[in-house]
Amino acid sequence: MLSRFSDFRYKEVINVRTGSRLGYVCDAEFTSPEGRITALIVPGRPRILGMFGRDEDYVLPWESISRIGDDIILVESEHAVRREKRPKRQGFAGKNT
């Protein structure tokens, strides 16, 4: 199966162990020289109608992914999924926005 990264954005990620829906892929981590994907990133759930930001992002190591289907990505191991805070974006002149 040949896929592009843009195809991952439309696939829902589901944790097989808990049966929970984690969301949709928004980004990926990869190694610089080889260009190999090391992890997929799913944004955290919004807090109170999205007005108070989001929870930490789910970072799914490539080894924890058990199956990639046409519209779903299944994640196998619960302990391998780590949560990270999203870095703040830099605005103009280096000020935080």
Image: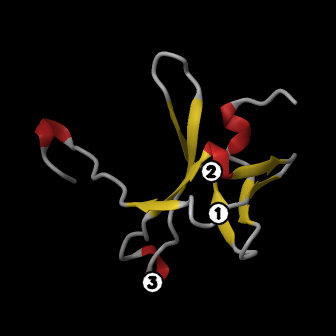
Residue 36 percent location from the top left of the image = 59, 26
Residue 23 percent location from the top left of the image = 64, 63
Could you say whether the residue bearing mark 2 is in a helix, strand or loop? loop
Residue 93 percent location from the top left of the image = 11, 37
Q: Is residue 7 above or below residue 33?
A: below
Q: Is residue 73 above or below residue 94?
A: below
Nearer to the camera, 95 or 39: 39
Taking the view exactly as shown, the residue that stands out farthest to the top is 33
The reply, left or right, for residue 1 in relation to residue 42 is: right
Q: Residue at x 57, y 65 (%)?
A: 79
The alpha-carbon separation of the residues under discs 2 and 1 comes to: 7 Å
Discs 1/3, front: 1
Residue 92 marker: none
Residue 19 percent location from the top left of the image = 76, 75
Is label 2 in contact with label 3 (beta carbons under 8 Å)? no
Amino acid type, callout 2: Val
Discs 2/3, front: 2
The alpha-carbon separation of the residues under discs 1 and 3 comes to: 17 Å
Taking the view exactly as shown, the residue that stands out farthest to the bottom is 48
Q: Which residue is denoted by mark 2 in the rendering?
A: 25
Amino acid type, callout 3: Ile
Q: Which residue is denoted by mark 1 in the rendering?
A: 23
Q: Which residue is denoted by mark 3 in the rendering?
A: 48
Nearer to the camera, 80 or 91: 80
Q: Earlier in the sequence, mark 1 or mark 3?
A: 1
Colouring rule applied to residues: secondary structure
The alpha-carbon separation of the residues under discs 2 and 3 comes to: 22 Å
Q: Residue at x 48, y 80 (%)?
A: 49
Q: Quadrant of residue 94?
A: top left
